[in-house]
Image: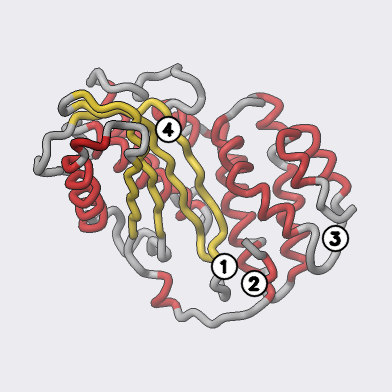
């Protein structure tokens, strides 16, 4: 991923920002017996068709701006109609006036199990738990859309976070893994609980300022954009002192570390002393990226 594209201007009409949500689902079966994986192939196609034929957001909700969500479902165990494995969810956010897709979401869900009978139909109802496969994927789609909308308008993703919470509440009554509270900060209930809490408004405001007042103006005023991003990143310090292991922040830096490194090692130089002090102290696991930032 090369951030030099941020300094090359491409014209995108506003119509290109009003495309529907697109989901790319890949199912990996390398860890299971290959003698009877036809149901998995059927599942992959049926689930992808369902995800792409469901209307997840309305045009009134700030336009789901050309959102592409990539899901990798890795199946590690099959027992008749019962499946278990992991799900990785990634998505980016198109930067205004460029063709650069900035990484926004990188979630890894390890507690994923579901039942599936070949050719069974899929239904989406946020208020009712029907199938854990659809509940989990629907939950993450709403999380991604919510974060995308947060990046265009302060706290703009709240309606979709509320839908994700509704899905989580309905799923809690089931015996499915990953929905109960206090299962670790990367549990599904705990993720949406954090996003719904005013304690994480600093994080959500960062999502907005980083993208809308930072990346989106990079082609026109790169120095100002970089200064804004640097200042906004440092505002996470208080939240990280209170919750040093917050999964949302960890996943943010998992998605953004390379981008931040490239931003501050290329183009016009800005003051990075406070930024580097913050990054090295609170995100030391990414020190390899921070070492490339111009001092």
Q: Which residue is mark 3?
A: 270
Q: Which residue is mark 1?
A: 100
Q: Dot 4: what SS?
A: strand
Q: Earlier in the sequence, mark 1 or mark 3?
A: 1
Q: Which residue is mark 2?
A: 5
Mark with earlier residue (4, 3): 4
Residue drawn 69% across the image and 74% down it: 7
Could you tell me if the residues under marks 2 and 1 are in contact, i.e. CB atoms within 8 Å? yes
Mark 4 nearby-residue class (10 Å; few <14, some 14–19, many ≥20): some
Classify residue 245 by image quadrant: top right
Q: Secondary structure at mark 2?
A: helix
Mark 1 crowd level (few <14, some 14–19, many ≥20, 10 Å Cα) = many
Q: Quadrant of residue 192?
A: top left
Work out how far the residue at label 4 is from the one at label 3, CA to CA, in angstroms: 37 Å
Circle on res. 109: 4
Marks 2 and 3, how far apart in space? 19 Å
Specify which label sits upstream in the sequence, 2 or 3.
2
Q: Which quarter of the figure is the N terminus placed in? A: bottom right
In the drawing, does residue 267 fall left or right of residue 5?
Answer: right
Q: Secondary structure at mark 1?
A: loop
Give the number of the mark in front: 2 or 3.
2
Q: Quadrant of residue 140?
A: top left
Q: Quick check: 60 left or right of 231?
A: left
From the image, state whether disc 1 or disc 3 is nearer to you: 1
Q: Which residue of the protein is positioned furthest toward the front in this rendering?
A: 35
Q: Nearer the viewer, residue 74 or 268?
A: 74
Label pair 2/4, CB-CB below 8 angstroms: no
Q: Are marks 1 and 3 in contact (CB under 8 Å)?
A: no
Q: Is residue 46 left or right of residue 281?
A: left
On screen, residue 229 above or below 34: below
Residue 105 drawn at (x, y percent): 50, 47
Q: Is residue 170 visible?
A: no
């Amino acid at each position: 991923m090369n951030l030099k594209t941020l300094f090359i201007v491409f014209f995108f009409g506003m119509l290109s920002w009003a495309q529907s949500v697109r989901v790319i689902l890949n199912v990996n079966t390398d860890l299971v017996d290959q003698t009877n994986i036809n149901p998995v192939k059927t599942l992959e196609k049926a689930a992808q068709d369902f995800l792409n034929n469901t209307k997840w957001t309305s045009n009134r909700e700030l336009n789901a701006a050309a959102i592409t969500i990539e899901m990798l479902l890795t199946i590690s165990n099959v027992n008749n109609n019962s499946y278990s494995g992991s799900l990785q969810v990634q998505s980016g956010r198109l930067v205004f006036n460029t063709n650069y897709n900035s990484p926004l979401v990188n979630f890894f869900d390890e507690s994923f199990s579901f039942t599936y009978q070949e050719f069974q139909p899929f239904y989406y109802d946020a208020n009712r738990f029907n199938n854990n496969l659809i509940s989990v994927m629907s939950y993450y789609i709403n999380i991604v859309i919510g974060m995308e909308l947060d990046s265009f308008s302060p706290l703009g993703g709240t309606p979709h976070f509320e839908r994700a919470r509704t899905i989580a509440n309905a799923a809690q009554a089931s015996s499915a893994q990953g929905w109960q509270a206090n299962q670790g900060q990367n549990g599904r209930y705990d993720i949406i609980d954090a996003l719904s809490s005013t304690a994480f408004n600093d994080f959500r405001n960062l999502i907005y300022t980083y993208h809308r007042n930072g990346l989106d103006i990079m082609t026109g005023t790169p120095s100002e954009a970089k200064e804004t991003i640097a200042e906004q990143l440092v505002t996470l310090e208080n939240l990280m002192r209170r919750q040093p292991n917050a999964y949302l922040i960890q996943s943010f830096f998992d998605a953004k570390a390379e981008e931040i490194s490239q931003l501050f090692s290329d183009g016009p130089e800005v003051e990075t002393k406070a930024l580097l002090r913050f990054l090295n102290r609170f995100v030391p696991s990414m020190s390899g990226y921070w070492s490339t930032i111009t001092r």
